[in-house]
């Protein structure tokens, strides 16, 4: 299985958690939907192209910053006593709020499209980007440090394979793919094949559990005359953790550079 391996760097970035408003909280690594959005933008895809994503990375620190927040209610008339801005007779409130920012982010991302012919397209899109790539907010620019096409294979490791102890990863609790190439039982990384090297006895899989958006289905709850389309997100349960190693005598996914891969 061929995939595109990306080494990326970002200075200050926010991977916003949905429904965080008073303070814009950030995920510790970009969720799958954010990475997929970046890939589609760089390739200029006009429709969704199925792909599997593996996300690993680390950051140095987390800081808070201020931003300008605008609030308005649909159809609410301007009142000088309560609104700061008058937009064509409608009132808009303006204030400040707080956002979390990750500093000095390093990412290792594997992208494996369902159509293997698109591997070259994705590779070329990141080797010769048509615009400054961003990941997270629009202003969160990406430095592309390296792009490679790698072969990802199932491997029976004879000795334990360790991930860099400073690197974190999203490890899916269960794969969403059900095709012949992705047996969810076989690739359940928490079924005694992936461990944290510092885990205590009886707690072999410590970490933070997240439910991350990956892609969505557009569902119409209206009718032909009055359509009401909603995005129904397909979510992936993952464990965010570090000090990861793959135990010997188990099948795991690795690229041809010897790095572990956790596709979702």
Image (tube, rainbow, N blue to C red):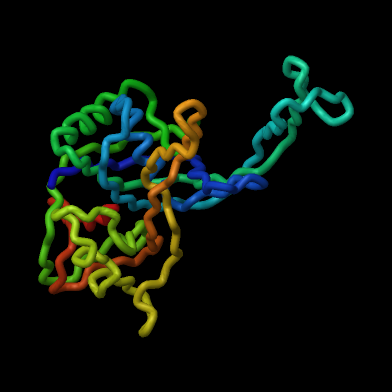
Q: Nearer the viewer, residue 85 or 150?
A: 85
Q: What residue sits 18% from the left and 43% below the top? A: 3
**In this rendering, position of residue 101 left or right of residue 216:** right
In the image, residue 145 above or below residue 62: above
> Between 111 and 64, which is closer to the camera in this rendering?
111
Horizontally, residue 217 falls left or right of residue 119, namely right
Towards the viewer: 4 or 186: 186
Q: Residue at x 50, y 34 (%)?
A: 228
Question: Which residue shows up at 42% across the image and 37% down it?
Answer: 135
Image position of 262 (left or right of 105): left
Query: Image quarter for residue 74?
Result: top right
**Relative to 125, does residue 11 appear above or below in the rendering?**
below
In the image, is 111 to the left or to the right of 34? left
Q: How far across and down, in percent of the image, does residue 159 sit?
A: 14, 71
The residue at the far bottom in this view is 201
Extreme right residue here? 81
Please state the total of marks drawn on the protein image: 0
What is the x, y in percent for residue 147?
23, 37
The image shows residue 71 at horizontal and vertical percentages of: 70, 33
Q: Position of residue 94 (x, y in %)?
A: 74, 31
Please tell me which residue is depicted at 79% across the width and 26% down the height of the picture. 84
> On screen, 211 above or below 63?
below
Which residue is at the far top?
88
């Amino acid at each position: 299985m061929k995939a595109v391996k990306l080494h990326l760097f970002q200075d200050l970035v926010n991977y916003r958690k949905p429904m965080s408003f008073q303070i814009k909280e950030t995920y510790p690594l970009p969720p799958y939907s954010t990475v997929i959005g970046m890939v589609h933008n760089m390739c200029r895809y006009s429709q969704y192209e199925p792909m599997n994503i593996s996300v690993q990375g680390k950051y140095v620190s987390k800081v808070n910053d201020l931003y300008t927040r605008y609030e308005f209610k649909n159809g609410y008339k301007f009142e000088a006593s309560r609104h700061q801005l008058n937009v064509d007779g409608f009132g808009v409130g303006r204030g400040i709020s707080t956002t979390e920012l990750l500093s000095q982010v390093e990412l290792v991302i594997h992208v494996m499209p369902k159509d293997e012919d698109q591997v070259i397209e994705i590779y070329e899109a990141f080797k010769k980007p048509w615009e400054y790539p961003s990941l997270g907010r629009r202003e969160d620019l990406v430095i592309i440090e390296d792009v490679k096409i790698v072969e990802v294979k199932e491997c029976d490791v004879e000795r334990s394979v360790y991930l860099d102890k400073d690197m974190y990863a999203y490890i899916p609790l269960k794969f969403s793919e059900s095709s012949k190439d992705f047996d969810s039982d076989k690739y359940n990384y928490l079924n005694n094949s992936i461990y944290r090297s510092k885990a205590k006895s009886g707690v072999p899989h410590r970490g933070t559990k997240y439910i991350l958006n990956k892609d969505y289905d557009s569902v119409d709850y209206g009718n032909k005359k009055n359509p009401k389309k909603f995005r129904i997100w397909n979510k992936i349960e993952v464990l965010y953790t570090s000090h990861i190693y793959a135990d010997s005598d188990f099948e795991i996914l690795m690229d041809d550079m010897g790095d572990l891969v956790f596709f979702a």
